[in-house]
Image (cartoon, rainbow, N blue to C red):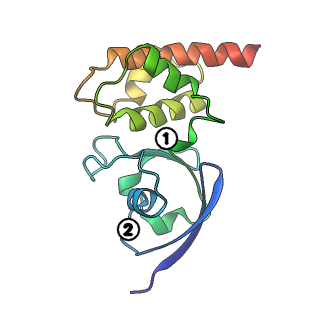
Amino acid sequence: MAKHHVTATVNGDAVEFLCETQETLLDVLRDQLGLTGTKEGCSTGDCGACSVILDGRLVCSCLVLAPEVEGARVETIEGMAQGGELHSLQQKFLEHAALQCGFCTPGLLVAAKALLDAHPEPTESEARYWLAGNLCRCTGYDKIIRAVMDAAAELRQERAA
């Protein structure tokens, strides 16, 4: 079977890879590009652990076939911190103790970033709805929502300054 040659932008960097038709974006991110922050939880799109932003849309990378990302822009958890400085969401997750085992954290952070990119002033209900596709078995969701709302407020203040 012939492999597909794919070029894309991942976290702002141009990448090229070869993949089989049935390989998922999750497989390529982890196994070929070494971006292991994106986690494999369910492989059915139900848990959100593999969430990435694909051309501005939040997707489960376990459901996207790798050949489909030709020419696309992909953002993963590894792309959130800039220049060694944590993204506001990452900092707020730490401050609010919004993580325990950490398995779901990358997907939650990416989903929260997608929310704030699309809706910089979400209500708590909107944040809860947006993050409903991400499952956490350790923390419950209140600390996560508080962290997201606090980060949204901080980011709004930064934009206003």
The amino acid beneath tag 1 is Ile
Q: Is residue 77 above or below residue 108?
A: below
Relative to the observer, which residue lies in front, 85 or 60? Answer: 85
Relative to the observer, which residue lies in front, 85 or 75? Answer: 85
Q: Is residue 87 left or right of residue 124?
A: right
Label 2 CA crowd tier, 10 Å (few <14, some 14–19, many 20+): some
> What residue lies at 46% left-to-right and 81% top-to-bottom?
3
What is the total number of numbered labels drawn onto the structure image? Answer: 2
SS at mark 2?
A: loop
Residue 134's disc number: none
Residue 23's disc number: 2
Q: Name the residue that disc number 1 marks.
A: 77
Q: Position of residue 69 (x, y in %)?
A: 53, 62
Of the numbered discs 1 and 2, the one sitting upstream in the chain is 2
> What residue lies at 49% left-to-right and 15% top-to-bottom?
149
The mark lying in front, picked from 1 and 2, is 1
The C terminus lies in which quarter of the figure? top right
Q: Residue furthest front?
A: 84
Q: Is residue 6 above or below residue 89?
A: below
Q: Is residue 41 left or right of residue 50?
A: left
Label 1 CA crowd tier, 10 Å (few <14, some 14–19, many 20+): many
Q: Position of residue 53 (x, y in %)?
A: 52, 45
The amino acid beneath tag 2 is Glu
> What residue lies at 48% left-to-right and 69% top-to-bottom?
67
